Image (cartoon, coloured by chain):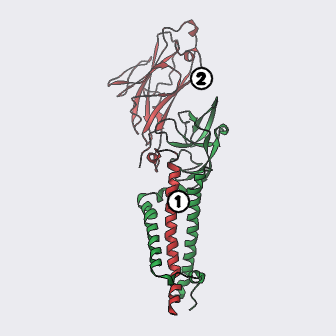
Chain colours: A green, B red
Amino acid sequence: MALLRVPRRVVAWAVQLALLLAVAAFVGLALLPRTGWYRPVTVLSGSMRPAFAPGDMVIVTPEPIGSVRVGQIISYRIPVGDHHVQSHRVIRVIRHGGQVAVRTKGDANTAPDPWTATLHGTTAWRVRAVLPKLGWAIFWLRTPLLHELTVLLAPLLLALLMLLQIWRGPNDEPLTERDVTGAPSA
Amino acid sequence: MNSFPLRRSRQKPAAATMKKLIATIAVLGAAASIAGLGTYATFTSTTSQSHTISTGTVTIALGATGASTNRLNIGASGVAPGDTIQRSVDLINQGSLDLASVTLTTTAAPSSLLDTDATNGLQMVIDKCSVAWTEAGPPYTYTCGGTTSSVLASRAVIGSNLALSNLGSTTAGATDHLRVTLTLPSGADNTFQNQSSTISYAFTGTQRAATNK
């Protein structure tokens, strides 16, 4: 038992740290984006290498369309095809009346995008920061098997553990802090 | 009674750690699924279709000059109203991805009345042949041993992002045999004398609509 005591403590701390990081990720990626201050976006293609690559996560923030400038990287819906969202660098800004349209180009592409995109609404989304590889992690966690394990099975297990604890009776409930974290003395 | 707290203190840290571990997994899963919502739902209802992970290449190229695979580098002089200039060019999709569309943008530098007058200036038509064009000349003329189809209907020579239709080279690895025909309309008057324009052709391929991979 004496040999196991230290590793167990290390494991406990590591798990504690992992839990903290997970909560931080939850707050940063899931809760705070709801405020509209910023938005995390997973990059799907390589046309903006080396600025960012597939699997990276970029943080976009709202930018009034009046202050969109050449050289900024913005995320917008392309005006052709499937109208997917794309993040490319602005190479030209065309202002006409209140309308703002942009020409864009991927840093790794040889040609500009073959369209002129009109920016709708009052704000555009501008790429501000890159979190390398984080998009892969999210993508990986969203694969069907892992999604079910994490979103269904893990909470279920947690609930079972809690039920077990309740069923064990009131004797188990008053745990002192020493019982949880301290090493047994005898 | 004395053995009970001892048992508890040995087992409790492990159980607490286990609970925290499961909680970590649950929180991560929740974060990922909600972050996903933020990424996809707010942006578009169609991005679930653009979930491409390994990327291909988008490369289109023109055939080599000096043969019927690309005669676009050959100029024409002494053109009179009513004259026709035919040039062949191969459009090759060298990438690994299919293309949603190929567009053509033409520009003129130096420019002249030949390209600035949309009505009486040069008119452009693009056709394709299912097999390589049979070339005669110079001056070059082309006949098709297979079937011809229209790629671009007659219009003024200068245009940007012109949609090209009936192309086979939207498929990765495929080649289209194109014939560009420029005509100086008979309506061109004396102001068109001694004019000279250099026309540049830029073909741009756009990646096909993404799908689930």
Q: Which mark is residue A25?
A: none
* Residue lying furthest right: A67
Label total for image: 2
* Residue occupying the point 57% across, 34% down: A118
Is residue B160 in sight in this rendering? Answer: yes
Disc 1 crowd, CA 10 A, few/some/many (<14, 14-19, 20+) = many
Q: Could you tell me residue B130's position as x and y percent?
A: 35, 28
Q: Nearer the viewer, residue B141 or B151?
A: B151
* Residue lying furthest front: A170
Sequence-wise, the earlier of marks 2 and 1 is 1
Q: Could you tell me residue B144's position as x and y percent?
A: 35, 23
Q: Nearer the viewer, residue B83 or A167?
A: A167
Residue B95: image quadrant is top left
Q: Could you tell me residue B98's position as x and y percent?
A: 42, 39
Q: Which residue is mark 2?
A: B109
Q: Are marks 2 and 1 in contact (CB under 8 Å)?
A: no
* Residue occupying the point 51% across, 68% down: B23
**Chain for mark 1?**
B
In the structure shown, which secondary structural element does the residue marked by tag 2 occupy?
Answer: loop
- Disc 2 with disc 1 on a shared chain: yes
Residue A123: image quadrant is top right
Query: Given the image, on which type of amino acid does mark 2 rest?
Result: Ala
Q: Which residue is mark 1?
A: B31
Q: Could you tell me residue B8's position as x and y percent?
A: 51, 85
Query: Given the image, on which type of amino acid does mark 1 rest?
Result: Ala
Q: Calculate the distance from the C-alpha at mark 2 to the C-alpha at mark 1.
A: 55 Å
* Residue lying furthest top: B190
Disc 2 crowd, CA 10 A, few/some/many (<14, 14-19, 20+) = few
Q: Of tags 2 and 1, which is closer to the observer?
A: 1
Left or right for A179, reference B175: right
